[in-house]
Amino acid sequence: MASLPGSRTADAQAPERAELAALGDDALRVALSRMHLIRKFEETAEASYMRGLIHGTMHLSIGQEASAVGTTLKLERDDYILSTHRGHGHCIAKGADPARMFAEFFGKENGYCRGRGGSMHIADVEGGNLGANGIVAGGLPIAVGVGMSIKAQKQHRVCMVFFGDGATNEGAFHESLNMASIWRLPIVFVCENNKYGMSMDIARAMAVPNVADRASSYAIPGIAVDGNDLPAVVAAAEPAIDLARRGGGPTLLECKTYRLRGHSKSDRNLYRTKEEIETWRDKDAIRRLEHELVAHNRFAETELRAIEEAAHKTIEQALEFAKASPDPDPAQLTRDVYAD
Amino acid sequence: MPTELATPEAATRELSYAEAIREGLAQAMQADERVFLFGEDVGVYGGAFGVSGDLFHRFGPERVIDTPISELGIAGAAVGAAITGMKPVLELQFSDFVTLAMEQIVNQAAKIHFMFGGKATVPMVVRLPGGSGTGAAAQHSQSLEAWFAHVPGLKVVQPSTPHDAKGLLLAAIDDPNPVLIFEHKLLYKTRGPVPEDPYRVPIGNAAVRRVGRDLTIVGSSIMAIRAAAAAARLAAEDIDAEVIDLRSLRPLDFATIAASVRKTHRLLIVYEGVKIMGIGAEISAMIAESDAFDFLDAPIARLGGADVPLPYNPVLEKAAVPQEDDIVAAARRLVREGRA
């Protein structure tokens, strides 16, 4: 559906910026819905953990939703993604069913991985999600092989691989970008730079100011974007996806964002200030986008609340599904170690 | 048991171990366009040990792919290609270099099928030239196969003959699981009968190379060859050794070992990897835990690599791994004196 900036009100307004104008109402509705699903999924996961319903640990991406949703918005269903330990957002953004995700979180038999993987290993292979990954930079070399596979099978798919700023100091990052470049593989490398590798500030861990700067070593485009600005993320990701699909090779896209929660459940935030966290809370991607949409009369406030409410309801149902799901049978402990 | 040779003519045709592997690779690539070979210098160079030979010229640069020196990256690329419909065969130039690729093999390849609840398979093959005896010193001579036999989700094979080198390779390529093939550098030029038509040596079946009554000698790869040579000498001393070539470490054909021990009442395990914490420890323990233990008339004896990095000096290098004379002496001790 074509959007006509400012057309729904007689008030003279500043025109929509190009990145927003490029997004139709349907696309925005999908994006908003996914961002709310992610936010609510993670808030609910966190609450479930606090109440002792989930064991283990989890890595929340609250605050990073625009990055997950914006980069994937223009992917096709049969495109691939590879995700990280902080991967709930990518999974939902790629179209996974939150109920089966929650069931996995709860370690239940009808979770995406039949309860064997948990939060850090959710994969939705049929949906093109080749898995979250518990190893920093673990997905990067795998993406190279996926790219080789797409090329060898003459498919028109694209592989988008997510990783954090910390991963860019792993050898795997450099080996992978180099191979993707020399073989012009259909890969979009998405670095979600949330400023910290656990506690280590990227400014202390990396010698160049931007992760995107590292693209020059591999003669590929390197683009840095405000990762909390959904229309800007979409506008940066779409050409990278198109380039990859056309056979033009990989792009390194850096989404500068921030995780509002700690690294994992053990994090006491000793390495950053409350003020810093509050500054980033003010840049919250969901509220920012909603304000802009209301300001330009793209959506009424009531419509936005309806989108949020629907997302919340989906997550509540997902939680109930997970709670009601059966546990795996210990007699099947060693099942699926090997494929037949 | 060893796979029967196809025809009398085929039985008379001899190939080297390296040629047999190359023939298997060529046949697999001819039969299935999903199969490709990649690794460092496997193209025009023909592989560091000449295994890929002319395959680059026969199948072209898209099926026989030279890679940068990026062991972690290429191991991950094998994983990515395997989970998206290809059947990669990766050559790691020396098996020692697998230390650079451990993450992808151990954390990713081995676990994806299980971790994803059986929803993805990783049909990849890694070929690893290993072993000592070439004067390549401590970083190019190791026998690390036991490390991988410790990892659920991996299969580990060690061919000793040209026949098995081809048959195990073709079985590994068919297998839906990651299979590591530890080839032995000293065996590449050894010759033996190899049927021309494709055939599979089932993974997990040991071969009884010599039937005997007085003791069981278990080995794999070049140690199975040395054990057979030792057994021939022992026969002249009226010691009748049964020789079992494991061929596969994981899965391990324990039934064949146990049946032999029940018959011979003595067990000598020979392996090139460092003696302690190795294959011999596992087999000894399995015997000790089984009813075969009751049949033993002597302690179990192990001959393994010395507890030292492989030395450069040829005399020291030879002294660091079991030789034919060592096997003869150990067998004699076990049978004549009843001690390990």
Image (cartoon, helix red, strand yellow):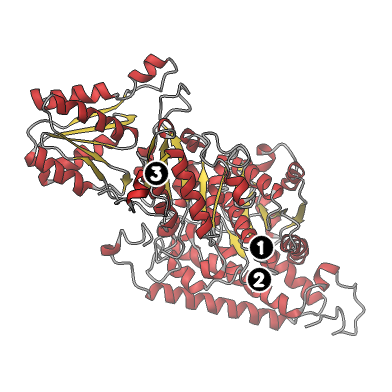
Q: Quadrant of the C terminus of chain B?
A: top left
> Relative to the observer, which residue lies in front, A54 or A301?
A54
Amino acid on which the number 3 mark rests in the picture: Arg
Label pair 1/2, CB-CB below 8 angstroms: yes
Q: How far apart are the two marked residues, 1 and 2, measured between alpha carbons?
A: 9 Å
Q: Chain of mark 1?
A: A
Q: Which residue is mark 1?
A: A158
> Relative to the observer, which residue lies in front, A101 or B100?
B100
Relative image position of residue A26 (x, y in whole percent): 72, 80
Q: How far apart are the two marked residues, 2 and 3, measured between alpha carbons?
A: 53 Å
Tag 3 and tag 1 share a subunit? no
Relative image position of residue B271 (x, y in whole percent): 30, 32
Q: Is residue A336 above or below residue B68?
A: below
Q: Which residue is mark 3?
A: B13
Q: Chain of mark 2?
A: A
Q: Residue at x 58, y 49 (%)?
A: A141
Q: Residue at x 52, y 66 (%)?
A: A125
Amino acid on which the number 1 mark rests in the picture: Val
- Residue A76 shows which numbered tag? 2
- Give neighbour class at mark 3: few <14, some 14-19, many 20+ (Cα, 10 Å): few
Relative to B256, A280 lies left or right: right
- Give neighbour class at mark 1: few <14, some 14-19, many 20+ (Cα, 10 Å): many
Q: Is residue B77 above or below residue A81?
A: above
Q: Residue at x 19, y 49 (%)?
A: B255
Amino acid on which the number 2 mark rests in the picture: Glu
Say which of marks 2 and 3 sits in front. 3
Say which of marks 3 and 1 sits in front. 3
Label pair 3/1, CB-CB below 8 angstroms: no
